[in-house]
Image (tube, helix red, strand yellow):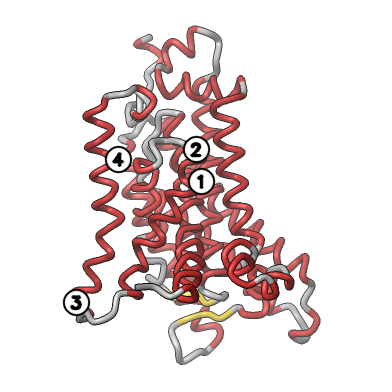
Amino acid sequence: MFSMSVLVTFIHQAIMQGIPILYGSTGEILTEKSGHLNLGIPGIMYAGGISGVIGAFLYEETLPSRDAINPVLAVLIPLLSSILGSLLMGLLYCFLTVTLRANQNVTGLALTTFGVGFGNFFGASLVKLTGSEIPSVALTNTSQFFRAYLPVADKLGAFGQIFLNYGFMTYLAIIIAFVSAYFLRKTRKGLYLRAVGENPATADAAGINVNRYKYTATCVGSIIAGLGGLFYVMDYACGVWSNEGFGDRGWLAIALVIFAVWRPDLGVPGSIVFGGLYIVNQFVTGLPMRDSELFKMLPYIVTIIVLIFTSIRKKRELQPPEHLGLSYFREER
């Protein structure tokens, strides 16, 4: 049975583990609401992470000493680099699937392969530039500004540990999720976006620019997903980049979309659940390593259960957009 200290530690680590997944799922939900199934999210998160690492590395290399680092630039440069890298990946996906009408599943998988290769190539290149014997790049000077939290958190016991002991990108992920939910459900442009995902021909006939909404939603979704990669490196991994270190968090983000029934706000508690299920093996004692690793299947098992449940109920609000994964040909309208 968990003691209070162990329970607090578990919740804190579950939230930290869930935040990159939340970034990815929020970005994917916006993309899917436009009717596009972007299986390239894992690659985009990877590209967003390495782009931020490159920006931070180049900035640190220009400093005469570690004490000369500027906190604002240390945050802005990796942040903007990550946004740029993720945006380019999103534009590439849009060009192939919206403009050229390529198969979305194949394009997404190719983008994931490309993003992982892109990250590994530049990650290995940075390791060679540093001359490190360890196959990783450490950006601890920049990372400290991403991980900074309110000093008062240490004085508030369990409450401070659970709610206040995080860097700014943790709260940014939650804010983005709730703002995205409000946008989709309460604004006119959000209604237009959902209309594009449900029936682009009808939306087009009503005067909505279908391609513009698809491009915008996918590119914004890619940027948000890329921030998940940046968070993982700069906050969760304390500024250390290691090739293949991101694991399967990108695929968990896509699974969370189904778990959250395409609602960004439900992705917030869902990400904590997924984060907790992902690390519960670390808190289970008395089991061999091979058996404890089986616990990592739990998020996927839960997703399958939710998918079966929503399919049986057949409630429209629990289903994906009607035109998800299908290319729109205006000539057939």
Residue at 29% across, 42% down = 106
Q: Work out whether mark 4 precedes mark 2 in sequence or the reverse, and give the earlier one.
A: 4
**Residue at image mark 3:** 290
Disc 3/disc 2 C-alpha distance (Å)? 39 Å
Position of 285 relative to 75 (above/below) = below
Label 4 environment density (alpha carbons within 10 Å; few <14, some 14–19, many ≥20): some
Q: Work out whether mark 4 precedes mark 3 in sequence or the reverse, and give the earlier one.
A: 4
Classify residue 272 as left or right of residue 259: right
Expressed as whole percent of the image width and height from the top left, the position of residue 193 reads 52, 24
Disc 4/disc 3 C-alpha distance (Å)? 33 Å
Residue at 28% across, 50% down = 302
Q: Work out whether mark 3 precedes mark 1 in sequence or the reverse, and give the earlier one.
A: 1
Amino acid type, label 4: Asn
Residue at 57% across, 69% down = 235
**Residue at image mark 1:** 222
Amino acid type, label 3: Arg
Disc 1/disc 2 C-alpha distance (Å)? 6 Å
Residue at 48% across, 23% down = 194
Position of 55 relative to 44 (above/below) = below
